[in-house]
Image (cartoon, grey):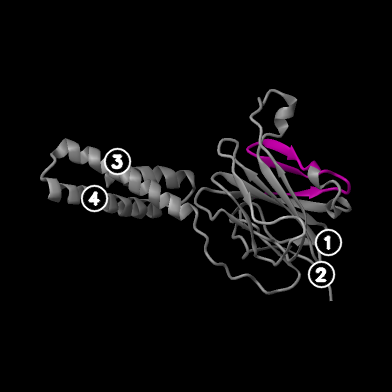
Amino acid sequence: MLAAVLITNVFFWKARKSALQATLTGALIGLAAGVPVYLINVLLGDMGVFLNIVLGFFSAVFVGFASFTIWFFRDPDRKIPKEKGIIVAPADGKIKYVREIKTGQVPVSEKNGLQAHLSEIAKTDLLEGDGFIVGIVMSITDVHKNRSPISGKVVLSKYTPGKFLSLKKPEGIINNERNTTVIEGDITVGVVQIASRLVRRIVSYVDSGDVIKIGDRIGMIKFSSQTDVIIPSSAKVTVSLGEQVYGGVTVIARYPPKK
C-alpha cells in the first residue's frame, strides 16, 4: 500500500492534483492489490515475506494500470447550457493562452513551445476577419473526450499526421499530430485537437457535412494533449489565463445571437 501511495502522489503531483486525492487513491489501489495476494496465501499457504512483497508489487501495478485505463477513458454526461449566443469549451483543461488573430493571418497553435501554422483553414470563413485563438491544455487527469463548442455544420475536418523532426531544423515547427474541425453555425468556430509527439492518437467522430449540436462529442485525444479554439472577433472571450474549464459546460465566449 505504501508503494501505491508514493507512486500515485508522484503521478498526481505531476498532474497538479492534491496530495489528499493522491493518498486516498493510492490507499484504495493498495487495498485492492492486497486482495489477490491474500487469496493466493489462503489457497496455497503462506508464501513467505519475499514472495508476498513481489506478488504485492505486481498486483499493485496491474490494479493501478487497470484502474487508470478505465478512469482515463471515462466519458461522463454533461449538462449542456441552453443559452443562446454562447461558445462552450471543447475540452477539459486549463486556459494556456488567449491570442488575437489579425485579418488574413494564419492562426498558430503552440504546444510545449513548438508552433503549428494552421494553413488548412486558409479557405474557410475563419480568416475573413479578426479573431482569437484560445489554447486549452489537458492534464492526464482530465476527461479527454472533446465536444462541439457550437451548433452547426462541419465544413472542414482535416487530419494532419505528426512528424518526428529535429528541433534544430526549420521544418521542426510542425511536428504534432492534429485534427482541425471547422463548424459553421450562427458563428464560425474552429477546433484544433493536438496530440503528444510521443503518444500520437486522435480519434475524430465527425466528418465534413455532419450537422452537430453544441456539446456533442466530436472526438478524443489519447494521453497528453491540447485543444485550441479559433473564435471570430464578433465574440467576446470570457475566460482568463489559468482558468479551469470543462468541455461542453464552461462558456468561453459570447456573441450576439441571430434573431
Label 3, label 2: how many angstroms apart (C-alpha)?
Answer: 57 Å
| Label 1: which secondary element | loop
Q: Are marks 1 and 3 in contact (CB under 8 Å)?
A: no
- Residue 31 percent location from the top left of the image: 27, 53
The structure residue drawn at horizontal position 70% and vertical position 67%, both measured from the top left corner, is 213
Label 1, label 4: how many angstroms apart (C-alpha)?
Answer: 59 Å
Give the residue pinned by disc 4: 36
Label 4, label 3: how many angstroms apart (C-alpha)?
Answer: 11 Å
User: Is 239 or 117 nearer to us in this picture?
Assistant: 117
Q: Residues within 10 Å of mark 3 (few under 14, many from 20)?
A: some
User: Is 182 or 252 nearer to us in this picture?
Assistant: 182
Q: Which mark is residue 259?
A: none
Q: Nearer the viewer, mark 1 or mark 4?
A: 4
Give the residue pinned by disc 3: 58
User: Is 147 or 14 nearer to us in this picture?
Assistant: 147
Give the residue pinned by disc 2: 256
Q: Which mark is residue 234?
A: 1
- The amino acid marked with disc number 4 is Pro
- The amino acid marked with disc number 2 is Pro
Label 1, label 3: how many angstroms apart (C-alpha)?
Answer: 56 Å
Quadrant of res 79: bottom right
- The amino acid marked with disc number 1 is Ser
Q: Are marks 2 and 1 in contact (CB under 8 Å)?
A: yes
| Label 4: which secondary element | helix
The structure residue drawn at horizontal position 38% and vertical position 54%, both measured from the top left corner, is 20
Q: Nearer the viewer, mark 1 or mark 3?
A: 3
Magenta extent: 96-119
- Residue 210 percent location from the top left of the image: 74, 61
The structure residue drawn at horizontal position 34% and vertical position 43%, both measured from the top left corner, is 61
- Residue 29 percent location from the top left of the image: 32, 51
The structure residue drawn at horizontal position 83% and vertical position 61%, both measured from the top left corner, is 234
- Residue 191 percent location from the top left of the image: 71, 53
